[in-house]
Image (cartoon, rainbow, N blue to C red):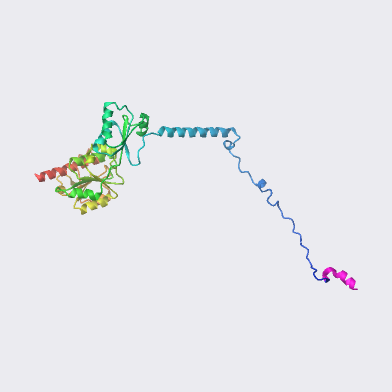
Amino acid sequence: MWGEEVARKGNQGYRGAVSKKAKRRQPPKKGSGGKHRRALQGKGPTPKAEDRPYHSAHAKKKKAQERAAQRVAAEKARKKTAVVIAEGNELVVGRNPVMEAAKAGLKVKQVFFAADVSQGRMRDILEVLAGSGATITEVTKRDLDRASDGAAHQSIAIEVEEYPYWDLTDLLYRATEKVEPGLLVALDQVTDPHNVGAVLRSAAAFGADGMILPKRRSAGLGVAAWKVSAGAAAHVPTARVTNLVDALKRCKESGFFVVGLDGDADALVRGLDLASEPLVIVTGAEGKGLSRLVRETCDLVVSIPTTSKVESLNAAVATGIVLHEVDSVRRALGE
C-alpha cells in the first residue's frame, strides 16, 4: 500500500522535489520580423531622364552645367582688374579731373597709369602726384577700362579718400568767431552731386562759412561734387549730420536765423530783412521743396519771383540767387 501511494505521488514526497508548471507555448507572431522591410518600401517616382546617370540626357545636362560654369569663370576673369580701391573711396579718371582733384587738395591714395611716362602731359601729372605720397602703379589699359566702366580714363586714374567732413560744433565755432555775421548753407534732400558742387561754388563766391548736409537722402561730397565745385570744396568746410532738423535747431541756439527757400512761400527774397543777421540758408530739392519738419523749423520761408514760363529753379541756381541777395544787402549796409 505504501508503494502504491509513492507511485501515485511520484517525487512529491521527497525533500527537494520541485513541481514545475509547463510553459505555455506562444503562438507564432505575424510578419517576418522586419526582415523584408526594404523590399516592401516603394522606390518613389521615376526620376527624370536627365537625372539618370545611365541616360544620354544626363550626359547632356552635365555638359551644359560645365559650359555654364566656364562662362561664369570667364566673366569673373573679365571683370578682374589690377585697379583695386578701398571701400568708401572713389576712383577719379581722366587727365584733367585727376589734375583738378590733386590741385583741390583731395587726399590721393593710389595712382594707376597705363601710358608712356615720357609723354609730356603724363610726365607732368605723375610729377605732381608723386609729391602727394601716393602709391604709383603701372597697369594695363584693359585694367583701367574695367575699373572705369568704359569711361574715358585717358590712361590714368587715382584713388581718393572720402571727404573729411567737419563736426557741426567746429563749423558753428568757425562761423561765429569772426566779426561779420555768419553765413551757412544747408541742403535738404538734394540728391544730385552736381547740384551740391555748384552750391559749394556759389557759397565760396559769396563768402559762406560752411555747408550742412544730411547723411540720408542727400548727395555727399564725392568726386562729381568736387569736380563741379572747381576747387571750392577745399575752401568751404562741410558738416554732415544725422538729423538736419536737430542741426538747424543747434544753429538757432548759436544765434543764427534759419531762412528756408521754397517756391510756395509768400515772402520774397528781394530785400531780405534778416540779411544783416547770422543766417542759415536752407534749400530743398527741385520739385519737392523743403520737407515738412525742416520748413516748420525755419524762422522765415522765402521764394524767388519768376515768370509763369518756369515752374521752379534747381537747388544750385536758387541758392546762388539768395546768396547774392544776402551779399548785396550786407554790402549796402556796410557802405
Residue 247, percent across and down? 25, 51
Q: In which quarter of the image is the C terminus?
A: top left
- Residue 60 lies in quadrant: top right
Which secondary structure dominates the residues rendered in magenta? Answer: helix
Q: Quadrant of the N terminus?
A: bottom right
Q: Which of 67 and 48 is in front in this view?
A: 67
Q: Is residue 265 above or below residue 98?
A: below
- Residue 152 visible (yes or no): no
**Which residue is situated farthest in the right direction here?**
1
Residue 232, percent across and down? 22, 39
Q: Is residue 152 above or below residue 304?
A: above
Residue at the spot x=87%, y=71% of the render? 6
**Which residue is situated farthest in the bottom direction here?**
1
Residue 35, percent across and down? 69, 49
Q: Which of 229 and 313 is in front in this view?
A: 229
- The magenta stretch is 1-12
Q: Which of 329 and 222 is in front in this view?
A: 222
Residue 192, percent across and down? 29, 40
- Residue 75 lies in quadrant: top left
Q: Which of 73 and 133 is in front in this view?
A: 133
Asked if the stretch drawn in magenta spans residue 255, the answer is no
How many numbered circles are shown? 0
Residue at the spot x=10%, y=44% of the render? 332
Q: In this view, does 68 lie above or below 241?
A: above
Q: Is residue 33 left or right of residue 232?
A: right
- Residue 238 visible (yes or no): yes
Q: Is residue 98 left or right of residue 142?
A: left
